[in-house]
Image (cartoon, helix red, strand yellow):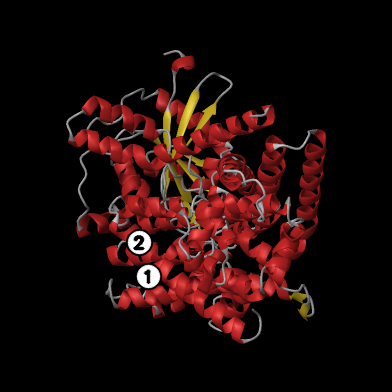
């Protein structure tokens, strides 16, 4: 693997991580929190929910 | 109490259209849009002011409401915040009531209701300049003593009286530190109570208003034309035609500048480093991909400039009134016009704005059809296809064909939305159409500050999207379009052997009847995250392929012109009008309907509709020799 290729793949990794995190916060965190709540794991559910609250779609067409 | 730790919480409350949001902007320098029609403020907005004396003031902009006896979800939010019934929301220390000085008889009822809650209240008598122009004479001292609360004149859009108002509100909070009512007893008013309130308003007005504001004769005369069924419709169509012509003509020069800048950057980066994967990622992926989206920033800003201008002048509410007749014919409630209009910017605020609709079935119908309205994310896609396939010839005088086609695409989306609403209201969501009650605001000279705030906000949103989601997806797309590498002695360009190429080829049979090849198939998938990504994806795919293929190298517009038939372009335009390619829209629908059933239904019906219409378009275009 060349130096250029290594850097390029590193950038791809960071981008993939960013997208995954965004997807998780926006679409997965709340259902996951509800799931934990149903299972009785309240502390875990609250922790997941707190992370989800940092994100979400706002009324300006942006989803953080 | 030390002022450094003193942080009063003010709640701005008042009737819709009394200039509450303009006052909020003046107080906070906030970036919230100023609405001119009722119900624009659906969400709670909060601003923070850090004063020179160290006091941090938190201001809450509550949705407009005519009474605490709330009927719609947004009015309920306003009432519940004041009652302290919203989870995680502290009660305000002071209510900053806002009333339009030109229509006190309507505004004071709510002030009396709020006063009965027991909070300290400061009243801002807004739009005083207009009231003076119209000859109104109000004795503020008498009004203040009759109401039993301090009253201050303001002209929010000119920031007149705003500083004094804020100081007085802070003083009122100081006099009442943490002593806001602990428990609020409130019940829906009886008819007798409402009658008594109106009677009290009459008494107050009799004592304090020496001369009422004259009716605006010119405004009424203008409305006779603007709201006329025939002339009003002609004006509406003309306004829209001018907007879309201007979007194309005025945006050309700045868009070309951005395009040249991006090309120069690509050439510089490409020549500064040796060939290799990083060079390809930066040039083919990042610069060409994201740059191809950024080019459309001037058009997006022009679209919002006109939307904000029409809203600020008071024309938008007139357009809503005119459209009520059309909306009524398909069974939609008149209030649905504002959510549908908001969907021209983005379906997300449009769907959220349906909270102003009381009836559940009407609200659901509006939610289901809102994504059919042409959102601003579709604008870059339309612009690209129009620039590539529609000649920029003159149709009639200054009217050019490209602008006309853009207008038709917007009309197409609106017609599809109304058509589907007609079907839903006669099948799934049957119900009678209630009458529209719409308050027409007075015509106003637009507030340029407010428009600039709005444009700055839109520019930031667009650039942020391009620099985050679109950039990240483009990088990932570059990877899946470049790996795995082509085998030794491969005859096709490397992208054919990549993950993206394989997926594109796998779904090609499904898309072939619509005239779409595997490259468009690749671009569809990331397009779900943001519609504009379709462009960056196409730019990246063609750029990577173009390394080994002259036919797919060069500017995206030229590439599409040489690679696609007109039938394919038309089919893709129709697809983009009708398809629900937006994950965020589905997520917000889930949130608003509290069920996965409706977003699933939305995705299904829109996909079937888009597929069928694109297939018909492609087939007819081919029969006409355009394929």
Residues at marks 2 and 1 touching, judged by CB atoms closer than 8 Å: yes
Q: Which part of the image, by quadrant, shows the N terminus of chain B?
A: top left
Q: Give B232 or B170, whichever is nearer the viewer.
A: B232
| Residue at the spot 59% in from the left edge and 59% down from the top edge | B519
- Which element carries disc 1, helix, strand or loop? loop
What chain letter is assigned to the residue under label 2? Answer: B
Q: Give B321 or B344, whichever is nearer the viewer.
A: B344
| Residue at the spot 76% in from the left edge and 61% down from the top edge | B250
Q: Is residue B624 left or right of residue B11?
A: right
Circle 1 crowding by C-alpha within 10 Å: few under 14, some 14–19, many from 20: many
Is B549 situated above or below B480?
below
What chain letter is assigned to the residue under label 1? Answer: B
Q: Give B31 or B176, whichever is nearer the viewer.
A: B31
Residue B426 point in image, percent of width and height: 30, 78
Quarter location, residue B518: bottom right
Q: Give B399 or B56, whichever is nearer the viewer.
A: B399
Q: Which part of the image, by quadrant, shows the C terminus of chain B?
A: bottom right
Residue B445 point in image, percent of width and height: 65, 57
Is A12 situated above or below B433?
above
Residue B450 point in image, percent of width and height: 62, 48
Residue B294 visible here: no
Mark found first going from the N terminus, 2 or 1: 1
Q: Which residue is mark 1?
A: B333
Q: Which mark is residue B197?
A: none
Q: Which residue is mark 2?
A: B357
- Which element carries disc 2, helix, strand or loop? loop
Residue B66 point in image, percent of width and height: 37, 55
């Amino acid at each position: 693997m060349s130096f250029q290729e290594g850097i390029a793949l590193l950038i791809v990794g960071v981008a993939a991580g960013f997208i995954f995190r965004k997807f998780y916060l926006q679409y997965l965190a709340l259902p996951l929190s509800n799931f934990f709540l149903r299972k009785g794991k309240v502390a875990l559910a609250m922790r997941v929910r707190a992370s989800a609250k940092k994100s979400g779609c706002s009324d300006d067409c942006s989803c953080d | 109490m030390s002022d450094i730790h003193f942080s009063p919480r003010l709640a701005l409350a008042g009737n819709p259209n009394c200039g509450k949001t303009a006052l909020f902007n003046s107080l906070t320098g906030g970036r919230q849009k100023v609405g001119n029609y009722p119900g624009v403020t659906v969400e709670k907005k909060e601003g923070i002011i850090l004063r020179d004396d160290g006091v941090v003031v938190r201001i809450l902009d509550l949705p407009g409401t005519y009474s605490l006896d709330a009927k719609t979800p947004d009015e309920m939010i306003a009432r519940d915040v004041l009652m302290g019934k919203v989870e995680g929301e502290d009660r305000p220390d002071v209510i900053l009531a806002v009333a339009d000085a030109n229509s006190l008889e309507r505004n004071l009822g709510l002030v009396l209701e709020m006063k009965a809650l027991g909070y300290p209240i400061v009243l801002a008598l807004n739009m005083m300049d207009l009231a003076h122009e119209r000859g109104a004479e109000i004795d503020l001292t008498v009004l203040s003593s009759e109401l039993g609360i301090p009253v201050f004149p303001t002209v929010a859009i000119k920031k007149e009286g705003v500083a004094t108002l804020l100081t007085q509100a802070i003083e009122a909070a100081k006099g009442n530190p943490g002593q806001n009512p602990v428990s609020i007893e409130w019940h829906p008013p009886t008819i007798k109570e409402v009658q008594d309130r109106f009677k009290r308003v009459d008494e107050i007005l009799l004592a304090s208003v020496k001369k009422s504001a004259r009716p605006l004769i010119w405004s009424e005369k203008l409305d006779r034309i603007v709201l006329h069924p025939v002339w009003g419709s002609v004006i509406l169509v003309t306004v829209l035609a001018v907007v879309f012509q201007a979007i194309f003509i005025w945006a050309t020069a700045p868009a070309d500048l951005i395009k040249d800048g991006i090309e120069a950057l690509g050439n510089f980066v490409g020549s500064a480093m040796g060939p290799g994967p990083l060079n390809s990622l930066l040039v083919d992926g990042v610069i060409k991909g994201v740059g191809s989206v950024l080019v459309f920033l001037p058009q997006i800003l022009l679209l919002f400039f006109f939307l904000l201008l029409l809203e600020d002048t008071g024309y938008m509410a007139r357009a809503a009134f005119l459209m009520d007749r059309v909306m009524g014919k398909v069974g939609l409630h008149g209030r649905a016009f504002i959510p549908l209009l908001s969907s021209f910017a983005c379906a997300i605020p449009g769907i959220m704005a349906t909270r102003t609709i009381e009836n559940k079935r009407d609200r659901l119908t509006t939610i289901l059809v809102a994504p059919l309205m042409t959102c601003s994310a579709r604008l870059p896609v339309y612009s690209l296809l129009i620039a590539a396939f529609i000649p920029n010839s003159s149709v009639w005088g200054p009217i050019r064909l490209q602008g006309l086609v853009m207008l038709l695409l917007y009309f197409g989306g609106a017609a599809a939305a109304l058509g589907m609403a007609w079907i839903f209201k006669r099948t799934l969501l049957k119900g009678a159409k209630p009458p529209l009650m719409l308050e027409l605001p007075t015509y106003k000279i637009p507030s340029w500050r407010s428009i600039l705030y709005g444009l700055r906000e839109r520019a930031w949103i667009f650039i942020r999207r391009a620099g985050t989601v679109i950039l990240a997806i483009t990088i990932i797309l570059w990877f899946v379009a470049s790996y795995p590498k082509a085998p030794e002695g491969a005859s096709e360009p490397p992208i054919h052997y990549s993950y993206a190429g394989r997926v594109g080829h796998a779904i090609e049979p499904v898309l072939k009847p619509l005239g779409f090849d595997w490259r468009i198939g690749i671009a569809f998938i990331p397009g779900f995250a943001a519609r504009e990504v379709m462009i960056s994806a196409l730019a990246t795919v063609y750029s990577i392929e173009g390394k080994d293929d002259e036919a797919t190298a060069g500017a995206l517009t030229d590439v599409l012109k040489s690679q696609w038939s007109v039938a394919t372009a038309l089919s893709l335009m129709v697809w983009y009008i009708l398809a629900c390619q937006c994950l965020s829209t589905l997520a917000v629908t889930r949130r608003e309907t509290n069920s996965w059933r409706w977003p699933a239904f939305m995705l299904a019906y829109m996909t079937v509709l888009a597929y069928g219409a694109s297939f018909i378009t492609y087939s007819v275009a081919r029969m006409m020799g355009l394929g």
